[in-house]
């Protein structure tokens, strides 16, 4: 890898992990578009990508630090019933992705190098966003921190976690599918984004616990430096992306997914066509 590739990956990761457009899919598309041969063949490439995800997770922790303080504090106080219930929803929704991701890690890795499949699934991701936009009608505004999580049951949280498994496939967006499932469960755009971003944090941190030690034990000093700088850069961009999206979804009550849906469909179709014709 080169430093230009590291920074470009970090910028793309910081944006696409939180925007509903699939960061993993873009991680596959980037080397395809720029003809970066064999960049993903290294055993250290996946840990490097996870380091970028860790930067994103830290950005989410910083942005929502008050939420996490209240969630943790709810374990030690009796009067924080809503926060304790929300923490339970996050735990329940995290279980499916944690189990399936570990059991089928090899199978999902085999999907990683395919730009054609990433393009196809990106189109499907866009169609899902379109479907949810049409399905969701304008509703009264509710403040998430004042009980909106009561709209989601533990069964629905588990199903949202199951949907999150799709994000292991390049082309499907973690934030896109979890926000879509959350909105179908009764949340508004900004509430769904809030829940999705909180839910993403333990999943990303869990992946880091599994993958980063592999990079450290490899003693590949250059790749470690790439991972650290890339993670910091991705975190900065992710923080700005989170701020933008929370503002965007708070002010757009109707068809907020539409721009992201069009982006996924157009980009996915172009990539799939180019890969299919041997570009």
Image (cartoon, rainbow, N blue to C red):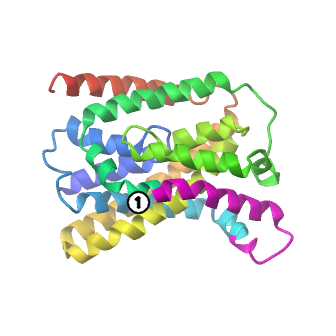
Count residues near mark 1 (Cα–Cα under 10 Å), then give few for <14, some for 14-19, many for 20+. few
Q: How many marks?
A: 1
x and y percentages locating residue 157 in the rendered image:
66, 49
Up-down: is 271 above or below 92? Answer: above
Q: Is residue 96 left or right of residue 134?
A: left
Seen from the viewer's position, the closer of residues 243 and 65 is 65
- Identified at 29% across, 58% down, the residue is 46
Q: Can residue 107 be seen by looking at this rendering?
A: yes
- Identified at 18% across, 56% down, the residue is 2
- Identified at 75% across, 26% down, the residue is 138
Q: Is residue 31 left or right of residue 121?
A: left
x and y percentages locating residue 61 in the rendered image:
56, 63
Seen from the viewer's position, the closer of residues 102 and 193 is 102
- Identified at 49% across, 30% down, the residue is 260
View extreme (front): residue = 103
As for residue 79 lying within the magenta part, the answer is yes
Residue 201's image quarter?
bottom right
x and y percentages locating residue 259 in the rendered image:
51, 27
Up-down: is 115 above or below 146? Answer: above
Label 1 sits on a secondary structure element that is helix
The C terminus, quarter of image: top left
x and y percentages locating residue 56 in the rendered image:
46, 57
Q: Is residue 107 left or right of residue 238?
A: left
As for residue 257 lying within the magenta part, the answer is no
Q: Which residues are magenta?
A: 72-99
View extreme (right): residue = 79
Seen from the viewer's position, the closer of residues 250 and 44 is 44
Q: Can residue 189 be seen by looking at this rendering?
A: no
Residue 123's image quarter?
top left
Q: Is residue 61 left or right of residue 262?
A: right
Q: What residue sits right under mark 1 in the picture?
A: 102
């Amino acid at each position: 890898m080169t430093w230009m590739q590291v920074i470009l990956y970090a910028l793309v990761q910081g944006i696409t992990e939180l925007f509903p457009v699939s960061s993993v899919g873009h991680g596959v598309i980037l080397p395809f578009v720029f003809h970066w041969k064999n960049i993903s063949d290294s055993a250290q490439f996946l840990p490097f990508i996870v380091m970028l995800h860790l930067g994103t997770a830290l950005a989410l922790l910083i942005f929502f630090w008050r939420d996490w303080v209240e969630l943790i504090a709810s374990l030690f106080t009796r009067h924080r019933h809503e926060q304790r219930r929300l923490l339970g929803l996050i735990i329940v929704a995290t279980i499916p992705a944690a189990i399936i991701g570990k059991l089928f890690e090899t199978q999902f890795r085999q999907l990683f190098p395919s730009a054609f499949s990433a393009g196809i699934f990106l189109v499907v991701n866009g169609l899902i966003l379109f479907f949810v936009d049409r399905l969701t009608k304008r509703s009264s505004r509710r403040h998430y921190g004042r009980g909106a999580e009561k709209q989601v049951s533990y069964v629905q949280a588990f199903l949202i976690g199951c949907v999150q498994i799709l994000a292991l496939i390049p082309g499907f967006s973690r934030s896109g599918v979890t926000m879509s499932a959350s909105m179908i469960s009764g949340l508004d755009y900004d509430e769904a984004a809030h829940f999705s971003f909180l839910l993403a944090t333990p999943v990303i941190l869990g992946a880091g616990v599994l993958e980063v030690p592999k990079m450290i034990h490899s003693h590949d000093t250059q790749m470690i430096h790439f991972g650290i700088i890339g993670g910091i850069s991705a975190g900065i961009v992710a923080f700005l992306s989170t701020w933008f999206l929370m503002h965007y979804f708070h002010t757009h009550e109707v068809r907020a997914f539409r721009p992201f849906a069009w982006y996924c469909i157009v980009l996915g179709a172009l990539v799939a066509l180019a890969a299919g014709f041997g570009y």
